[in-house]
Image (tube, rainbow, N blue to C red):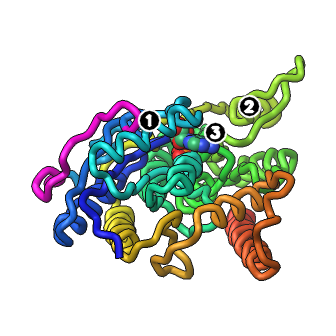
């Protein structure tokens, strides 16, 4: 059985509240097991350029409550090249780093699997507000982001109500409508537009007109940033602003547009994010010490489990209709059926939530 001297921890891609809680859990659990933890500053860039700090038990004190990431994050193109990858491996070898835990989203996991296949045991832990990794029910940061959106929507509701206005609010989520959908339901939005389900613009405008006739004053519409319209020159433009104009023109209701943008990425992590971060961080160290590699820690049926990274990334591409030629060749029929079941479960979950918006709108 391999002995582990040092484990490197990095955060990469878009930051998410709760990443610090993952770092803390990994460092503390590793130290308890007699393994040193090393923080890699600035994602894969820090691994290439040997930017390392010791993560003793006390070095991760007082970070569980903090948003962002104490290890900072970066997007690193060099890491996608063989030369960059070899520099990263050299850093591990010359600094006695026997394994890496990479916290981030799907891009981060692609990097992790590249390291793993070159002989550096690597485990991925989710850290992305978008909850857009199909193979896991939950990603660290999602709950805090949704709660931030709800808090802002509640504030906008107050002022919409006072002035009998409509507010179209665009929220982050990349190509995934989960934040918009769940926060929209929780804030009592009249309609939600997400990339996964075609948006019925005409029905929404009719709904707004009908609500006005029923003397409804404040109205909220949530649009995920992954929804686009096409302008008169054929360019892709964010749908939220387009919808805002159409609502105002067609209903006569004063309509505002708000883009929450990165507000949604910051802030103190919620209990759910701190708890899941702690569970996933501990699981990552357990897996490494069991000699496992090339796995991502996921939540499946509300339990913390692990899954082969390549399986998880392939299931993700299957869900997003981005499978490439040969992607499924290395998987058994049983694996492919499991991926299809994961995709179907996700589609069903979104369809069920979307139906609630329509069931509850005035
Ligand atoms: P996220 O992890 O949030 O999805 P990105 O997609 O930006 O964020 O990926 C984060 C980083 O992971 C990239 O900047 C790059 O360093 C690394 N990465 C992404 N894709 C690959 C890849 N195909 N091979 C190696 N590294 C990758």
Location of residue 68 in the rendering, given as x and y in whole percent from the top left corner: 34, 43
Q: CA distance from mark 3 to mark 2?
A: 11 Å
Look at the image and give the residue range highlighted in magenta.
Answer: 47-62
- Looking at the image, the residue that sits furthest to the left is 58
- Inspect this view and state whether residue 125 appears: no
Residue bearing the label numbered 3: 168
Q: Nearer the viewer, mark 3 or mark 2?
A: 3
Secondary structure found at label 1: helix
Q: Residue at x 48, y 56 (%)?
A: 119
Tell which tag, 3 or 1, sits nearer the viewer.
1
Judged from the image, the secondary structure of the residue bearing numbered disc 2 is helix
In the image, residue 358 sits, relative to residue 236, either above or below, namely below
Bin the neighbour count of mark 2 within 10 Å (Cα to Cα): few under 14, some 14-19, many 20 and up.
Answer: some
- Residue 305, relative to residue 175: is it above or below? below
Q: Earlier in the sequence, mark 3 or mark 1?
A: 1
Residue linked to disc 2:
248
- Which residue is located at x 58 percent, y 36 percent? 82
Circles 1 and 2: CB atoms closer than 8 Å: no
Ranked by sequence position, the earlier of labels 1 and 2 is 1
Distance (Cα) linking label 3 and label 1: 47 Å
Q: Position of residue 317 (x, y in %)?
A: 74, 56
Q: Quadrant of ligand 1?
A: top right
């Amino acid at each position: 059985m391999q002995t582990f001297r040092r484990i490197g921890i990095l955060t990469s891609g878009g930051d998410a509240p709760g990443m610090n809680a993952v770092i803390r859990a990994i460092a503390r659990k590793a130290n308890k097991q007699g393994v040193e933890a090393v923080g890699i500053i600035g994602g894969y860039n820090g691994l290439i350029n040997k930017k390392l700090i010791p993560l003793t038990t006390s070095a991760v004190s007082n970070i569980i409550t903090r948003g962002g990431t104490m290890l900072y994050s970066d997007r690193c193109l060099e890491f996608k090249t063989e030369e960059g990858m070899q520099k990263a491996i050299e850093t591990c070898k010359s600094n006695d780093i026997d394994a890496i835990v990479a916290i981030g989203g799907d891009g981060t996991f692609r990097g992790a699997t590249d390291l793993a296949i070159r002989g550096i045991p690597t485990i991925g832990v989710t850290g992305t507000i978008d909850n857009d990794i199909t193979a896991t029910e939950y990603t660290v940061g999602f709950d805090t982001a949704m709660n931030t959106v709800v808090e802002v929507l509640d504030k906008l509701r107050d002022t919409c109500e006072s002035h009998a206005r409509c507010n179209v609010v665009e929220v982050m989520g990349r190509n995934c409508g989960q934040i918009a959908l769940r926060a929209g339901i929780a804030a009592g939005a009249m309609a939600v537009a997400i990339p996964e389900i075609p948006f019925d613009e005409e029905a929404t405008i009719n709904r707004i007109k009908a609500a006005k006739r029923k003397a409804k004053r404040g109205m909220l519409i949530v649009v995920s940033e992954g929804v686009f319209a096409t302008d008169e020159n054929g360019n892709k433009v964010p749908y939220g602003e387009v919808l805002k104009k159409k609502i105002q023109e067609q209903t006569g209701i004063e309509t505002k547009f708000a883009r929450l943008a990165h507000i949604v990425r910051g802030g103190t992590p919620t209990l759910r994010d701190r708890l899941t971060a702690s569970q996933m961080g501990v699981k990552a160290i357990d897996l490494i010490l069991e000699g496992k590699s090339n796995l991502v820690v996921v939540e499946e049926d509300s339990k913390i489990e692990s899954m082969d990274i390549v399986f998880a990334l392939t299931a993700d591409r299957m869900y997003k209709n981005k499978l490439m030629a040969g992607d499924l060749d290395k998987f058994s029929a049983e694996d492919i059926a499991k991926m299809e079941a994961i995709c179907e479960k996700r589609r069903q979950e979104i369809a069920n939530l979307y139906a609630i918006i329509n069931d509850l709108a005035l």
